[in-house]
Amino acid sequence: MSDWTSVLVGDPRADRMVPKTGFTVQLTVFSAAAMAFLAVFALALSLATERLADRWSAELARTSTLRISAPQDQIAAQTEAALRVLQTTPGVGSARALSDEEQIALLEPWFGPDLPVASLPIPRLIEIVETGDGFDATGLRARLQAEVPGAVLDDHTRWRAPLVAAADRLRSLGYISLALIGGATAAMITLAAQAALSANAQVIRVMRLVGATDAFIAGAFVRRFTLRAFAGAAFGAISGAAGIFFLPEADVAGGFLTGLGFEGLHWLWPLAIPPLAGFVAYVATRAAAFRRLREQS
Amino acid sequence: MIELERVAYTYGGAELFADLSMTLAPGSFHFLTGPSGVGKTTLLKMCYGELIATSGMVRIFGQNSREMDRDQIALARRRIGVVHQDCQFQDHLPMAENVALPLTVCGRQEEADEYLSDLLAWVGLSDQAGQLPPQLSGGERQRAALARAVIMSPEVVIADEPTGNIDWEMSQRLLTLLVELNKMGKTVLVATHDLNLIRAAKTQVSARVLRLRGGQLQAAGAEL
């Protein structure tokens, strides 16, 4: 039987050789559950920031905004002129002026629904969608300066880059958190395994005296700790996933926090946490057991 | 089977014995005697690889124990049944599971179901199979330890003061079991300071008596 098969299938009589010790059981199950719970959130954070960075990169890179700031009686004419310039600019896929309703919707979160747009000197916004190659922003600015003096081109580069960088950094922090959680889990399980090995020094001695190999003795501990870590992590991962599932629904104005969670197939990622915790426990307990057995000889 | 050649053992800077030689031939019966603290248990531990000699050579089934790795020692112990002075049981397991322990650790548990009831009947412990070791009397523990020592049908049986904590009648019963094992072809080495037990054995079996004294091993004479 391979090591992994023996861990999964086990042998009830071999399992009984090591008495169950309460405190290491509780420590392993609790730490695996807590770490899996935290891992679900770190995973959700990483995946959410990844989506956010991708969305910001993709969407903002393809759009620009032209703002027409001019006296009220010139706005319509300058808007027309700007649209004509844009229609003849290579790299501009489409351009359209936002309606009053769309501009009110943009301002509503800050000024409320009763904003008297008609009586305020609000600039007109033109949304530009680029083609794949994009346009020459410097050339376009020069043409607009000559033909539409009230136009200000914003190609989003100024604020898109730090946002994407921040999202990338958050994603990296999420992955670093996952690695730290894995390391902390391994450390805690190693401590619990060492405590169990010390508490069972006499049991180990008797097993050696009757001809047990190190692999057999280690196996009795490894199987127990692997299954405990798996069970604890399964509980923690399910609880964490449930916590994410019941987060408030995201809406357009919800911002980043309500977007924290899993989408589509990403919901399968938490399922990987219990086997991973089991694997970490397997490696940590096996290393601790063989080290302790060598020391005891 | 087991050979000790010019073996010395030093513990805590003090030399327990030196230049000690002994051979356990197949089918032989040896008693090892001597005062308490002279090193009988240490000598036995060398015979099953729990201790390594400070100098000299111990050969266990032809292998130099100093050169055996941990797995090789474990495999050699499956061929040597040992009755320890303090029995060395797993107190959380019933006596029957303790007796079957050598089979369990080498993955032959199914054989336990086959032999266990006969073996427990042989040592007179059929009714105590489900009891935990702390619930057994001294004599019952020693007999259970003997049953565990022979369950793998080892080539060598080593017993360390097997009658130390039991009455004379029980000692006689245990001796009879050891003699029966020897008659079945097993090599037997018994460490004891009970001279009456040795005298009783010599009426039943051809046993060689070795006396450990002053760090030297001598063949005991006719006084026994």
Image: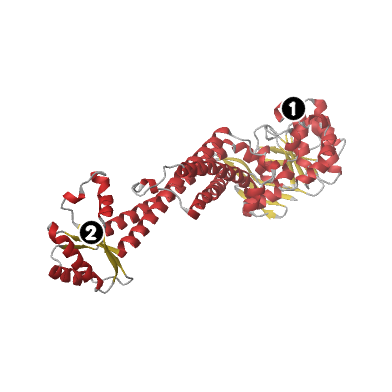
Judge left or right: residue A119 versus residue B69: left
The percent position of residue A16, horizontal first and vertical second, equals 67, 38
The percent position of residue A282, horizontal first and vertical second, equals 56, 49
Residue pictured at 80% horizontal, 42% vertical? B113
Task: Choose top left, top right, bottom left or bottom right for residue A65.
Answer: bottom left
Query: Mark 1: which secondary structure?
Result: loop
Query: How packed is label 1: few (under 14 Cα within 10 Å), some, or many (20 or more)?
Result: some
Q: Is residue A22 above or below residue A109?
A: above
Q: Are marks 2 and 1 in contact (CB under 8 Å)?
A: no
Query: Who is closer to the viewer here, A242 or A3?
Result: A242
Q: So how many labels did they put on this image?
A: 2
Query: Who is closer to the viewer here, A94 or B60?
Result: A94
Residue pictured at 82% horizontal, 32% vertical? B126
Task: Choose top left, top right, bottom left or bottom right for residue B203.
Answer: top right
Query: Mark 2: which secondary structure?
Result: strand
Residue pictured at 43% horizontal, 42% vertical? A247
Judge left or right: residue B171 versus residue A76: right
Q: Amino acid at mark 2?
A: Leu
Q: Are marks 2 and 1 on the same chain?
A: no
Distance Cα–Cα, label 2 vs label 1: 94 Å
Q: How is the image coloured?
A: secondary structure
Query: Who is closer to the viewer here, A296 or B5?
Result: A296
- Do we see residue A160 in this rendering? yes
Question: Which residue was labeled with disc 1?
Answer: B136
Query: Who is closer to the viewer here, A230 or A63?
Result: A63
The percent position of residue A208, horizontal first and vertical second, equals 65, 44
Q: Specify the subunit that label 2 lies on.
A: A
Q: Tell me the tag on residue A125.
A: 2
